[in-house]
Amino acid sequence: MKNEKTYELVLTALFTAIIVIMAFTPLGYIPLVVINATIIHIPVILGALFLGPKKGAFLGFVFGLTSFINNTFKAATASAFVFSPVLAYNVDGVAGVFKSIYICFVPRILVGVAPYFIYLLIRKLVKGEGREGKIFVDALASVILYISVRAFLIRLFPETLSTAVCTVIGIAAAVALMAALTFTGIKKKSANIALAYAGLAGAFTNTLFVMSGIFILYKDAYAQAVGVAGEAVLDVIMGVVTFNGVVEAVVAAIIVAGVGLALTRIKPVYGIGRQN
């Protein structure tokens, strides 16, 4: 028991160090032609899986703290105030302080909680006796692939490919994935699939809660900061969610599945025995 607690303490310190290094260096981003995909949340997701939701929440807090520091002292963009209670005070007074605390910390803390429970849910669905769970997981993966491919092509080839063509390609990719998953027995690899969905869930949790918080709490101030009309803020936010959010979620799924699979050979997912 003592060795286990020591091991978890060391792993927590390691994940914390990785988050800090990623946050304050270019290592926290992967260049993908038309986007730099953020991967700072990945150590938080892995921490949630292998250390449990409590320590995952702590790592999420560290992630939020690095975001607060970066946006307060660097303020690289005009919208940095949404992540900095200090800068937000000049925008919206005391109310702005609490709004920015929420946006900066709550989504990041949830990144350290949600993936663990999504992992448990997906693993249960895939390992279930009925086919309904597997069909649901397969269909969800196909929908995510469709959205990702379509959004990526629209952003990458805005003048070459029409929206209709991008949609057709996205549907074709989704159908191909669905067919492959349907005719492939994946039950024995339920842990691998659950790891990938945990990565997706963690990345989406961050994107959805941050962007919805900005829209609800800072719609007009954010519109002014990014230079768009107030009624166009929703379009900007949906663009971030459907492109940046989906691409980063797919990247997180791949990395979390790969690194998580390697870690399960040393330590099982929190509260679960050795992986199947």
Image (cartoon, rainbow, N blue to C red):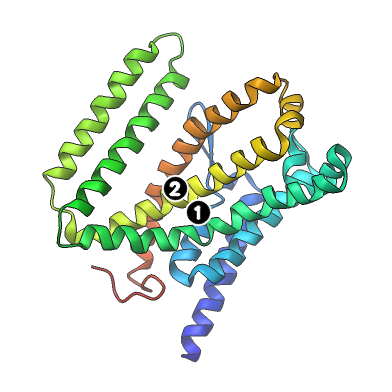
Residue under the image location 28 percent in, 37 percent down:
142
76 left or right of 11 in image: right
Q: Amino acid at mark 2?
A: Ala
Describe residue 147's horizontal placement relative to residue 73 as left or right: left
- Most distant residue in the bottom direction: 2
The image shows residue 180 at horizontal and vertical percentages of: 16, 40
Q: Position of residue 275 (x, y in %)?
A: 28, 69
- Estimate how packed mark 2 is, as few (under 14), some (14 to 19) or many (20 or more) residues with alpha carbons within 10 Å: many
The quarter of the picture where residue 12 lies is bottom right
Residue drawn at x 15%, y 37% as measured from the top left: 179
Residues 105 and 152: in front is 105
The residue shown at (36%, 52%) is 197
Q: Position of residue 60 (x, y in %)?
A: 60, 59
Contact, mark 1 vs mark 2 (Cβ under 8 Å): yes
Secondary structure under tag 1 reads helix
Q: Position of residue 257 (x, y in %)?
A: 36, 54
Whether 225 is drawn above or below 71: the answer is above
Label 2, secondary structure: give it: helix
User: Circle 1 is placed at which residue position?
Assistant: 42
Q: Residue tagged by mark 2?
A: 252
